[in-house]
Image (cartoon, rainbow, N blue to C red):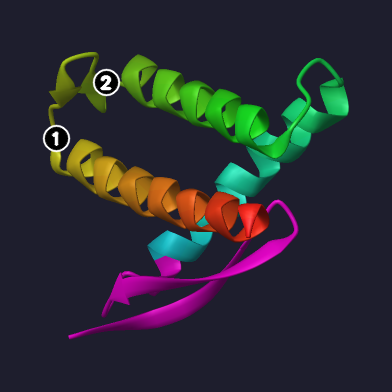
Amino acid sequence: MSGAIKITIFDKEYMVACPEGEETALKASARHLSEKMKEIRSAGKVVGMDRIAVMAGLNIAHEAIELGVGTASGPSSPVGTRLKKLNTRVEKTLAKYRQSELN
């Protein structure tokens, strides 16, 4: 069974679907992404939430690959698969956020 939990990314709150038992991992992932986005923003070289999110995602993906979690062609472990699923959730949430800002 799954439910929705509230997470905060880059000072914005989102309700995200989450399988039972994955709440802690999802919240930790959201904190990690938010921290990376804030680091990029504070460096001052990237402007705009979309670009900051993309750069943070690339940095996190690079870290995962460096740790052997996955390769450029796809995840090679259960952790890589989990990261891919979490990344998909984050992408969907950001797409909804972007759409709501356009309306």
Task: Report the residue at 80% width, 31% height from top.
Answer: 41
The quarter of the rendered structure image containing the N terminus is: bottom left
Task: Report the residue at 47% width, 49% height from top.
Answer: 95
Q: Is residue 6 left or right of residue 2?
A: right
The location of residue 36, given as percent across then percent down, is 65, 35
What's the mark number on residue 77?
Answer: 1
The location of residue 8, given as percent across then percent down, is 64, 64
Residue type at the position of mark 1: Ser
Mark 2 to mark 1: distance in Å? Answer: 9 Å
Task: Report the residue at 33% width, 19% height from top.
Answer: 65
The location of residue 77, given as percent across then percent down, is 14, 35
Using the rendered image of the protein, determine whether residue 69 is visible from the camera's viewpoint: yes
Question: Looking at the image, how many numbered discs can be counted on the residues?
Answer: 2
Q: Earlier in the sequence, mark 2 or mark 1?
A: 2
Q: Nearer the viewer, residue 17 or 68?
A: 17
Residue type at the position of mark 2: Gly
- In the depicted structure, whether residue 16 falls above or below residue 20: above
- In the depicted structure, whether residue 73 falls above or below residue 86: above
- In the depicted structure, whether residue 34 falls above or below residue 80: below
Q: Which region shows up in magenta? A: 1-24
Neighbours of disc 2 within 10 Å: few (<14), some (14-19), many (20+) = some
The quarter of the rendered structure image containing the C terminus is: bottom right
Residue under numbered circle 2: 68
Judged from the image, the secondary structure of the residue bearing numbered disc 1 is loop
**Magenta stretch holds residue 18:** yes
> What is the residue that sits farthest to the front in this orientation?
103
The location of residue 57, given as percent across then percent down, is 49, 31
Q: Is residue 3 left or right of residue 30?
A: left
In contact (CB < 8 Å): disc 2 and disc 1: yes
Task: Report the residue at 86% width, 29% height from top.
Answer: 42
